[in-house]
Image (cartoon, helix red, strand yellow):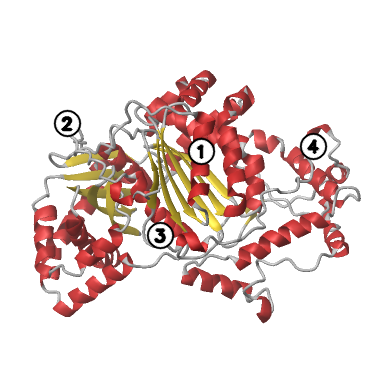
Amino acid sequence: AEGLQNVSKVVEIVFSYIHLIQSDNYGIQEWIHNESATVAACQFRFLSKRNPMDYALSLASTMQLYPPNHVLSGPYQFYKYDPELIAEFLKYFTPENMLMQVTSKMFEGMTSCKEHWYGTEYNIDELSAELCMQWSNATVDSNIAAGLALPERNDMIASDFTLFKDMAENMPKNEPRLLLDNDGCRLWFKPDNVFDMPKVNIMVLLRMDSCSSPKKNVLALLYTQILQEVTNDFTYLASMASLHSNVSHSSRGLELSVSGYNHKAHILLKRLVKAMAELPSSLDTSLWDRVKDKVSKQYENFQFAQPYQHAMYAADVCCEQTIKWKIEDKQKALDSIDMEDLLVFAKQALSEFYLESLVHGNLSPKDAKEVVAVIVDEFKPTPPQSLPQQLVSKFPQNIVDAFPEPNPKNTNSCLVVLYQLGPMELRVNAILALFHHLLQEPAFHELRTQEQLGYIVHTSVKTNGNDVKSLLCLIQSDAYDPVYLESRLDAFMGRLSEKLLNMSTEEFQQNIQAVCQTLREKDKNLFEETLKYWNVITNQTYLFQRLSNIADHVEKISKEEVLQFFEKEIVENEGKKLSVQVFSSQHLDKMVKSERNLPPEYFPVPAIPNLGDYKIME
């Protein structure tokens, strides 16, 4: 409602900036064109590979806009600087030439037109001459637009694209190496010896207690949201130079990432770290109130998410009871938190953490150490005495978590079933990967296409904690209740054994080849490769070649082994599954009583493996 009351002021601010661009003293600047042209040329020159289907679709679109000789480069290139043409174009940015759309539920019952295809109700009104005059005379000198100015020259635009090829030749191409390993820090390093790009990905995890209670979980979220607000100015400039950063929180602590051209990546990292250190002095009551309200709305809006999202979240809460919390618990914690709590959290969080990092790309080992030094020298952290363990509940029997769909207007119900399998060796993991591949297509075909149980039918292998595996089956339906959906899922599982038994040797081998091909698929770009390493670093398994090793095992699996796995882990394990049932209002009469009183029994947390073989000898 507050935003709706200030629509006119928002438009006035926009026209104030447009008039600034149109002005003779400040407006059309060649250096701005040159900066944009430099960044665009670099983007095209060092364009990363992407999904072939997505790329083909994008090219089909650009063919409608550019001549044949510019189909590939057109979206990335700036051509001749033409201030007269720009000025001519800007003449059309007037209130009289503007179509303004304002959407709000406040207009319900106040409209007279209806859109033909979707029945959307709307009105079309002329802008008053008084408003147009007000916006036409808007300037940055007015109180409402005070502070608006053209961006500063961007000091984060890369100009040095030299590749460190000599150093990269002596490093493995499929895993990083351990450059630092001490009581407070672990630094993994891998040069880019695959894609030969002048880019770097810097991944940092500050391991700390950010999740052992709803309050700490909410404080960590508030901290990252406030940090995003106070860093917007320079992170926007960085993004214009194809440098990107992110700060988020997880059950393991705070995560930072910086990616882009290596030449200026250190500048962005230093500014980000400085902003973290200075956050207490940057925080005022206005910013605090705004961010707290934003987080509160995020929690409130979760009730309007899809039922399958509610079911998946509930499954995680059941599985990870010591680090995942109900939304209601988070909302209560948020209500009790004040600005002083956040300041205390920030001080403790940045003084007591264990730093785990990965530097991957076009940097030298010396440069990689300097990256870590930026963080360590700023915060001088002490290692925490203890960290929350990634504990996963062990199901002693069938667990049913049934609850009404939070959004009463959503007519969909949802079922999520987790067949809990636990930690497993690589060979068993390989059998699971193959079994899921064999399950995926018939589950979709029978449950969705033939039985038409619901629009969403999904299966996957799920990991909780660091290494606890489950087979996940999900069905969302507006026609059937979760109890009936589970009965149909059970019937399908009962028929699956015969389907596998009757599968020909040739078809079985074709499925093996398909799984191996997926597991051995090459990374399309540097960031995909980085994420592969980062996932096994954060979960502390450090199995950098895990996927290829699983593929090696898959090649040797027999059909008998798959059948034995199915009988032992799914059929005989029937009494150890989690069933999350979300009932829409139309199915509430079918809702069963929840049976989710889990005893405090957890899977053992695996020990960190010996990392000596990964260390670089200096």
- Earlier in the chain: of badge 2 and badge 4, it is 4
Q: Tell me whether the residue at label 4 lies in contact with that at label 3, contact meaning CB atoms closer than 8 angstroms.
A: no
- Earlier in the chain: of badge 2 and badge 1, it is 1
Residue 384 percent across, percent down from the top left: 37, 27
Tell me the kind of residue under disc 2.
Pro
> Which residue is pictured at 14% across the width and 54% down the height?
570
Q: Which residue position holds label 3?
A: 171
Displayed quadrant of residue 491: bottom left
Tell me the kind of residue under disc 4.
Ala
Q: Which residue position holds label 1?
A: 373
Q: Which residue position holds label 4?
A: 145
Relative to residue 406, is residue 161 depicted above or below? below
* Mark nearer the viewer, 4 or 3: 3
Tell me the kind of residue under disc 1.
Ala
Q: Calculate the distance from the C-alpha at mark 4 to the C-alpha at mark 3.
A: 54 Å
Helix, strand or loop for disc 3: loop
